Image (cartoon, helix red, strand yellow):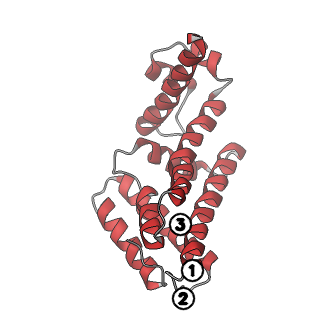
Amino acid sequence: MARPKNQDERRAHLIQAVIDTTATTGLRSLSLADVARRAGLTRGAVLYYYDDLDALLREAYRAGMERFCDRRDALRGSIEDPARLLGETIRAGLPTGPDDALMRLLYEFDVVAGTSPLHTTLVESMYERQLATYRTVLEHGVDTGAFRLTLDTPTAALNLVALEDAYGLHIVAGNGQISVRRAVEAMFAAAGAFGAPAA
């Protein structure tokens, strides 16, 4: 019974190797050999767990979906107050800082979207999930009377996603112009301006 656990651990190790390697080489230059080297395995050993590099990339992207979509959606089950829920949703959607390798990988996918059906599909699915998350949080706030939106809900959600993506990109770029704290403050201000105060 130890084998499945070992396989799960090895797969998680390989996904982390993809994330870490992309942070240094970039997604365009990433190869299966790079991932194998980072993981301390042979190329053949990597292929035992994943059919090809695309399969690895799909799993790495899934890790991003889990962190930035699934975990945020789960907040709705534990936070009743709409303003606090919106605030935590905003915070959880931003990188932790310039060294956030998983967020950097997600932005790398954005760069190459349009040049590959795989990358385009993954980026579109993430975008739809981001929109759905914010729409649901805003609708909850409106339904409870906590938010009085001056924009229609889809437009308000669209603006929050755009800000999240833009500020997140500046944060991982590491130029020091926008900190995580400043990005949170700016998103809170924008949400408050269209009638959805965040806390």
- Read off the residue under disc 2: 150
Residue farthest toward the right in the current orientation of the protein:
117
Question: Residue drawn at (51%, 20%), measured in percent from left and top?
Answer: 36
Question: Residue drawn at (66%, 55%), measured in percent from left and top?
Answer: 124
Vertical arrangement, residue 138 with respect to residue 6, above or below: below
Screen quadrant of the N terminus: top right
In space, the residues marked 1 and 3 are separated at their CA atoms by 18 Å
Residue farthest toward the left in the current orientation of the protein:
176
For badge 2, the amino acid type reads Thr
For badge 3, the amino acid type reads Val
- Read off the residue under disc 1: 142
Local packing at callout 2 (Cα closer than 10 Å; few below 14, some 14-19, many 20+) is few
Q: How many marks?
A: 3
Vertical arrangement, residue 32 with respect to residue 2, above or below: below
Nearer to me, 136 or 41? 136
- Read off the residue under disc 3: 161
Q: Position of residue 62 (x, y in %)?
A: 59, 41
Q: Position of residue 94 (x, y in %)?
A: 42, 57
User: Which circle's residue, 1 or 3, is located before the other in the chain?
Assistant: 1
Give the image quarter of residue 177.
bottom left
Element at label 1 = helix
Give the image quarter of residue 53.
top right
Nearer to me, 38 or 60? 60
Element at label 2 = loop
Q: Position of residue 182 (x, y in %)?
A: 31, 67
Question: Residue drawn at (49%, 81%), measured in percent from left and top?
Answer: 146
User: Which circle's residue, 1 or 2, is located before the other in the chain?
Assistant: 1
In space, the residues marked 1 and 2 are separated at their CA atoms by 11 Å
Question: Residue drawn at (56%, 56%), measured in percent from left and top?
Answer: 73
For badge 1, the amino acid type reads Val
